Amino acid sequence: SYVLTQPPSVSVAPGKTARITCGGNNIGSKSVHWYQQKPGQAPVLVIYYDSDRPSGIPERFSGSNSGNTATLTISRVEAGDEADYYCQVWDSSSDHLFGGGTKLTVL
Amino acid sequence: QVTLKESGPVLVKPTETLTLTCTVSGFSLSNARMGVSWIRQPPGKALEWLAHIFSNDEKSYSTSLKSRLTISKDTSKSQVVLTMTNMDPVDTATYYCARISRGYSGYDYDYFDYWGQGTLVTVSS
């Protein structure tokens, strides 16, 4: 079955750029979606179809996907961006699959 | 305004069957290329997709839980129901329903664009 690998944690100073990766075999051939989940809240879609932003999501959030790695990039990080981030794909062997999640800490 | 709301028991006993209902508003369960999924999250752990149902009654289940799950919808009531049989303490989790939107770019791709608040289900005797 397909596996998505995310780093457990990423730390970044306010105003800097955070990059959260999602690794998978030839993930570049799939559509990757990203969700933000703050403590005690439901997930929120922040990027879909690799790099599209839903309405209401700041332009600071962007995505890319190539080869074996998809990346969520958060520019000019703010304290309010501190959350868990999950990548998600659809795979014929695993259906809808989420990564293990990455905890973003704003220093 | 799209909303989804989960309802069901907060506590179930081992071996019992769990029935959860997702009531949606702001969109119709008959909308083309839209559906509803159930996703769960054990305390402190990652998200796990369980099942989905689309407007054309297309259904799909997690391979590992397929034998225990049934999903159905009542379009007139704007409700999607998930049943999970033979509950076990490891099934303790927050259960979310989420709207799926299906895009197309040479192939279909699904993403979860709206989520309910979730409901915590504890399995314990």
Image (spheres, rainbow, N blue to C red):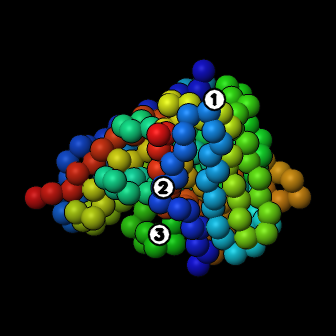
| SS assignment at label 1 | loop
Mark 3 — on which chain does it sit? B
Q: Which residue is mark 2?
A: A9
As drawn, the label of residue B66 is 3
Disc 3 marks a residue whose amino acid type is Lys
Residue B27: quadrant of the picture: top right
Disc 1 to disc 2, C-alpha distance: 36 Å
Check if mark 3 and mark 1 are on a common chain. Answer: yes
Q: Gap in Å between the C-alphas at discs 3 and 1?
A: 27 Å
Q: Are marks 3 and 1 in contact (CB under 8 Å)?
A: no
Residue that label 1 marks: B27
Q: Chain of mark 1?
A: B
Q: Residue B77, image x and y in percent? A: 50, 32
The amino acid sitting under disc 2 is: Ser
Nearest to the observer: residue A40 or residue B124: A40
Q: Is residue A100 left or right of residue B19?
A: right
Residue A96 at x, y percent in the picture: 60, 61
> Outermost residue, left direction?
B125
Q: Name the secondary structure under disc 2.
A: strand
Residue at 64%, 67% in the rendered image: A23
Between marks 1 and 2 in the image, the one whose residue lies nearer the viewer: 2
Q: Callout 2: 10 Å neighbours few (<14), some, many (20+)?
A: few
Q: What is the chain identity of the residue bearing mark 2?
A: A
- Give the vertical position of A90 relative to B55 (above or below): below
x then y, percent, for residue B81: 44, 46
Q: Nearer the viewer, residue B47 or B76?
A: B47
